[in-house]
Amino acid sequence: METPLKLKLGHFAKRLAIIVTVVCALIFLLEGLRGEPLLESFMIAVALAVSAVPEGLPAIVTVTLALGARELAKRNALIRRLSSVETLGATTVICSDKTGTLTKGEMTVRKLYTNGQITEVTGVGYEPTGEFRSSEVAANPIDDPNLALLLRIGVLCNDAKLAKDEKWHIIGDSTEGALIVAAAKAGMWQEKMENAYPRIGEIPFSSERKLMTTIHSTPDGERLAYVKGAPEVVLTRCTYVYKNDKVERLSKRERNKILKTNEKMAEEALRILGMAYRRLPDNLTDFTEENVENDLTFVGLMGMIDPPREEAKEANLLCQTAGIRTIMITGDHKLTAMALARDLGIVKSGSVLTGAELDKMSDEKLERAVKETSVYARVSPQHKLRIVKALKKNGEIVAMTGDGVNDAPALKHADIGVAMGITGTDVSREASDMVLADDNFVTIVNAVNGGRIIYDNIRKFAFYLMRCNFDELLVIATFALMNIPVPFLPAMILWLNLVTDGGPALALSMDPPTEDVMQRSPRDPKEGILHGKLASIIASFTTEYLGTVFIFWLIYYAFGASLDKARTMAFMVATMRELIIVWNCRSEKHNAFKVGFRSNRFLLIAVIGSLLLTASLCYIPVLSSLFHVVPLGITDWILISMVACSGLLLMPEILANRKILRWM
C-alpha cells in the first residue's frame, strides 16, 4: 500500500522531471546554435539538470523519517515501517479500543448482582483486600451460597493468574484478573479453588461468541460447566436461575429484571459479565458449544470498572483541536461505552452502533453512518474491518488499534495499524505499522504530532530546494537566448547544488516544530507536497535570478571587469543568497527575523560552514583554477552581501496567503 508521502513525492518527481528535461534540452540546443563547443554545451546542460533535480531529496526524506522514528521510540511509539511516520501526520480518524488504551487497564470489581440484590465490593487495583457490603451491611460471601457460587465461577472460568513480586499484579487479561482478586477478597484463593475443582475441559472465549466455558469435576464427583460472558448472550443460553440456594425456572419477568439491572449497571460505566453454570450428564464426553452451552442456570452479574486514563481526556481534546476524530470501539455494553465516551469527551450526545446493528447494515448505509458515529459497542474484529473500509471510502486517513489475532485484517487494511505492545499478540504486532510500548491512547496522539512535525520539515526542505534550484536554469536560458557568455560554468553549478542540497537541507529536517502544529486541521491527502508554495517559489527564484543577472551585468558590462571576475561575483551572489533564503523556509507564516536564527543550531552551523567553504574557493590556488574564480576585495564582498541579503526581505506571511495554482 502506497503512503500519502510516497504518492506526493512520485507526483512531484514526474512534474519536475518534465520541466527539467525540456529546459535543459532547450539550453543545449541554444548553446549549440550559438557556436559553443558541443561538449561544453552538453556539460552545462547536464550540470543544470543535476542542479535542478533535488537528488538529495530521497536521502533526506529517509534520514528525516529515521530521526522521527527514533524520537517516537523515545515516547513509546515503535515504528515498524519507516514510511508510516509521515502517514501518522495525515491521520484524520483514530479508531481506538477502550480497555487499556483509553482506560488504565486495571479492572476492579465494584458490584455483584445475584439473588435479586446488589452487593458492593471495596478495594482498588489488584490488592486482594476489601469488603463486601449489601445495603450498607457487611456481607460474608462464604456464608452466602449465591455469592459464593458467583465468585467461584469467576475464579475458575479464568485463564489469568494473580501474582506478587514487589506488589500484586495480574498475569494475563485484566478483566479476568479482576474476578480472581474479587474472589481472593472473600478468601477464595485461585490455587485452592482449582485444586478442589480441577478443570477437565474448556470451550475458549472468542469475540464472536462472547462466551467462555470451563468444565470442572467437583469434590462430590459431579461435572459442572462454568460459563461467563456478555450478560445478554449468557441469558439467551439460560433456562433456569439460581435463587435462594435453589434452581428455579427463568421466567420472562425475571429475565427482564436481570436485563434492566444490567443496563443500570452499564450506565454507571461498569463493564459487566454474566455468570451461569450447568450440571453435565456423566456420559457426556464431547465438550462442544452445542453440547454444553445450553439449558444453563443463571447465577448473577459482576460489574467492574476500568477507570479512564487521566491523560486520555486531554489527548482527545487535543485531537479535536487538530481536526482529528476519535472513535471508540469496544466489546462492552453500549451504555457502558457511551458513559465512558461522554466522560472522555469523545461524544456529548448521540447514538452508538452495536455489532448486531452493524450486521444488519449494508456497506453503503455503513459508509453514511460512520460519518456521524463515534462509539461502537459489542463489536467483533470483523466489524472493525468493515468500519475501517467504510471510513476509507469516505476519504479518511485511518489509524486503527488492535491486540488480538483476529484484529490483524483491520490493522492491515488501516492506513496506520497500531498494535498493543503489552497486551497485543505476535500476530497483531506483525500486521501493524506501529506498536505502542505502553498501550496508551496518548502515545498515538503524540505519534500523530510527531508525524505532522516530520511532514512539515519535509515540506521545508522540498520548498527550499525548489526555491534554490531553478534560478540557475533561468539564468543560463536567458543568457543563451541573448547569445552572450553564461555566468556559470559546470563546476560552479555543481558546487551550488552541493552546498544547498547538502548540509542546510539536512539541517532543515531537524528544525524544531511550530507552536500551531496540533492546532490546524489535517492536510488534504490530495494536496501536493508544495501546495500553496508556488507563489513564494516563483518570487524567490525570480529575485535570485535578477540579483545574479544584475551583479554579472554590473561587473562585466558596466565596470568592464574580466569575465572571470564577473562570473566569480555572480557565483558568490547565487551561493550566498541560497544559503541566506534558507532562513525564510522555516515558517510558512513568518520571515527569518520573526522565527529567529538560533533555534536551529544545526542549520546555523551548516550555513556558516558552507559560506566559509565557498569563500575559500577564491583564495586557494588549486580550487580557484579548478572553478575559474578570482580573489575578491572587501568592496566586492560588501556588494555581494548587499545583493544576497535582500532575500531575507521576502515575506512568507504575505506570499502564503496568495492561492496561486495547485499544479505542484
Image (cartoon, helix red, strand yellow):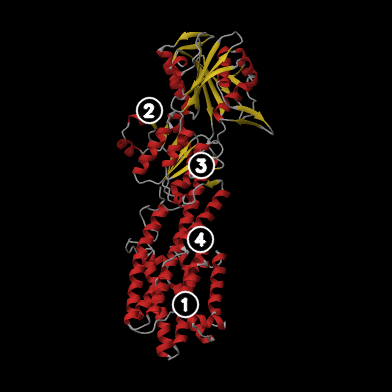
The local crowd at label 4, few if under 14, some if 14 to 19, many if 20 or more residues have their Cα within 10 Å, is many
Horizontal and vertical percent for residue 336?
46, 30
- The CA span between labels 2 and 3 is 26 Å
Q: Amino acid at mark 3?
A: Phe
- The CA span between labels 4 and 1 is 26 Å
Q: Earlier in the sequence, mark 4 or mark 1?
A: 1
Judging by the rendered image, the residue that carries numbered circle 2 is 356
Depth check, front residue: 172 or 539? 172
- The CA span between labels 2 and 1 is 70 Å
Judging by the rendered image, the residue that carries numbered circle 4 is 509
Mark 4 or 1: in front is 1
- The CA span between labels 4 and 2 is 48 Å
| Total number of numbered discs in the rendering | 4
> Do the residues bearing badges 4 and 3 touch, measured as CB atoms within 8 Å?
no
Q: Amino acid at mark 1?
A: Met
Q: Earlier in the sequence, mark 3 or mark 1?
A: 3
Horizontal and vertical percent for residue 482?
33, 83
Q: Seen in the image, is 159 located left or right of residue 476? A: right
Judging by the rendered image, the residue that carries numbered circle 1 is 492
- The CA span between labels 3 and 1 is 52 Å
Q: Which mark is residue 546?
A: none
Disc 1 secondary structure class:
helix
Q: Amino acid at mark 2?
A: Ala
The local crowd at label 3, few if under 14, some if 14 to 19, many if 20 or more residues have their Cα within 10 Å, is many
Going 52% across and 43% down the picture, which residue do you hit? Answer: 435
> Do the residues bearing badges 2 and 3 touch, measured as CB atoms within 8 Å?
no
Q: Amino acid at mark 4?
A: Ser
Q: Which mark is residue 441?
A: 3
Depth check, front residue: 500 or 588? 500
Q: Is residue 269 above or below residue 541?
A: above
